[in-house]
Image: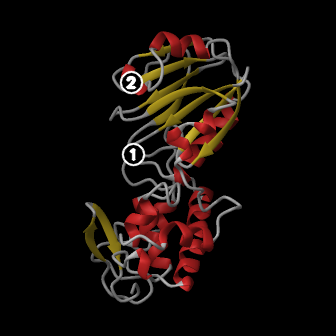
Amino acid sequence: MPELPEVQTVINYLKTKIINQKINNVIVSALKVLKNATAKEFKKFLVNEHFVDIKRIGKYIIFILSNNKVLVSHLRMEGKYKISQFKAKYDERHVLVRFILDDFELHYHDTRRFGTFHIHSVLDYQDQDYLKKLAIDPTQQEWDWKYLKNNAQKSSRVIKSVLLDQSVVAGIGNIYADEILFLSKINPAKKANELTDQQFKEISKNATKVLLKAIELNGTTIFSYQFKENHAGSYQDYLNVHLQKDKPCKVCGNLVKKTKLNNRGTYYCAKCQK
């Protein structure tokens, strides 16, 4: 699943391509991705509008359109955006939405069909329940260790699970939770309500550090993530523990271990992380 750095990288790329492009037509081939509109309503809402800006809330992509309209997209497991030239061949089975723009087509491609689209007014989209429940993320100015502690300190869940809870901290997924906890020297199975102030400070600092570095490197490509056609991220080259089972820890030399916490594959160094 694309996490915050991958989503931000997609946004950074799309900003160079679609801003000021007019939506001339919209073709939907999978109705299940539309969450608050029929295909007819979706098309009517979008056609003749222009892309004005692209923002992000957590892992949601926020397309700001002309006439105070907003299109909200979530990539879920396998969603991707692809630029396609007019009349070019494309993957008809997995391109679920086609946006016909002035100079090219923007395709939403999703092999798993888990992605979502919502349409809103710019005046009320931030008041939608699915966005209001999200916490701030570690790249935002408001983020600090006290915010994290306030959201997490009463939880008896393991800290790995707490970091994956988007109502506690937005944007972190399985890959980056492993990396953040490794740099913070905290065992992922440690309960959140057992953490000290210093440990919250370490998590807060390393969450920002890891996510910003991953954005700089265009995200992490492990299976299929691409931020544009034939362009992958490169943060996977810097992973310390995630997917490193039975390889020597880069700090102490002990073998990295893998376990499952709440059914999520979790990688850690038992010596470095206490």
Can the viewer see residue 30 in this picture?
no
Position above or below: 245 against 175: below
Residue 206 vs residue 42, the one in the foreground? 42
Can the viewer see residue 46 in this picture?
yes
Task: Tell me the residue at 62%/39% (across/down).
Answer: 126
Residue 64 vs residue 97, the one in the foreground? 64
Secondary structure of the residue carrying tag 1 is loop
Figure quadrant of residue 15: top right
> Which residue is under mark 2?
91
Position above or below: 19 against 248: above
Residue 120 location, x and y as percent?
Answer: 60, 26
Residue 197 location, x and y as percent?
Answer: 56, 83
> Which residue is under mark 1?
224
Secondary structure of the residue carrying tag 2 is loop
The amino acid pointed to by label 2 is Asp
Task: Tell me the residue at 60%/56% (across/down).
Answer: 136
Figure quadrant of residue 5: bottom right
Q: Residues within 10 Å of mark 1 (few under 14, many from 20)?
A: few
Relative to 54, is 37 on the left or the right? Answer: left
Q: Quadrant location of the C terminus?
A: bottom left
Relative to 65, is 72 on the left or the right? Answer: left
Mark 2 or mark 1: name the one nearer the start of the chain: 2
Residue 206 location, x and y as percent?
Answer: 56, 73
Q: Residues within 10 Å of mark 2 (few under 14, many from 20)?
A: few
Task: Tell me the residue at 43%/37% (across/down).
Answer: 79
Position above or below: 264 against 182: above
